[in-house]
Amino acid sequence: MIETGVKGVQLFRVSDPVRCAPAIYEPTIIAIVSGSKEAILDGKSYVYDKSQYMCCSMSMPVEAGTPTASPENPLLGVYISLDTRVMTELAIEMESATGAIRLPKSGPIPSGLALAEWDETFTDALLRLLQLGRSPVDTAILGDNRLREVYYSVLKGEAGDSARRAFGVGNEIARAIEYLSTRLSETVTIEDMAAKVGMSRAVFHRKFKQATKMSPIQFVKSMRLNTAAMKIAGGMNVNMAAMEVGYVSSSQFSREFKRMYGQSPKQWIHSKQQLTDVT
């Protein structure tokens, strides 16, 4: 990862294959300029390259990797963290502006993970942002404005429905996920999340599944297990990782981990170590 000088914007390079592993995608734009990247959400694979960028508009439990990266064909890309305050300001301004594209009053909620074609507006905005790297002074003075242009291009593009729903008016599901994400070690029920955003349990369940492709119960479990897997991969022992995401029983954690990933936590760690040794 290479810092660009603009907060939340990094360049990255991956020159070895990395198989898909548990991860949490935060609100992010990932634009690939060479190679390809894969994310798996509830069994569905999203592969994107220089023809499409990925917009994740709310925290999502995924499996992510770069299975085709190599020294001869490295993965090169741009990682852009989405600033909630700025995205919300822009989304609401767009919704209130005369002639702006407006959200449908009803109908299914767009997925929180979307792939979008590189249109001219996005390409130009991204290029203008990255060109700032030639001058620290330009970066310091113009960086925030150029980043705002990229955000705006995303809101106008193919991923715009997903992003506007997450950051603009009617962002109940994104707010519920944000509420959950800060309370993984606590017992959070569907009723808690529904009440937080003023919905009935049934309506919340339906809209949540439209946005995340998972039921609220599946989503909570995936968030906890993926977060624990990331902690274990970082060196934390299994019991501690289980406790930090709200499990009081290590045996229950191991059972659910194996059901999710096909291996017990110890087997999973061992297989990752073997893969590291090989590569």
Image: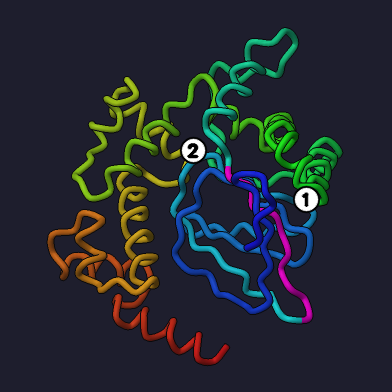
Q: Is residue 204 above or below residue 52?
A: above
Please tell me which residue lies in front, 201 or 155. Answer: 155
Does the residue at mark 2 contact the one at mark 1 (Cβ under 8 Å)?
no
Q: Is residue 124 magenta?
A: no
Residue 43 visible in image? yes
Mark 2 or 1, closer to the camera: 1
Is the image coloured rainbow, by chain, by secondary structure, or in one colour?
A: rainbow
- Identify the residue at horizontal 66%, vertical 71% (top origin): 14
Residue 117 visible in image? no
* 272 relative to 194 in the view: left or right: right
Amino acid type shown at disc 2: Ala
Q: Which residues are magenta?
A: 72-81
- Identify the residue at horizontal 34%, vertical 50% (top origin): 218
Residue 194: image location, x then y, percent? 30, 28
The residue labelled by disc 2 is: 211
Residue 171: image location, x then y, percent? 47, 26
The residue labelled by disc 1 is: 133
Majority SS type along the magenta span: strand
Amino acid type shown at disc 1: Gly
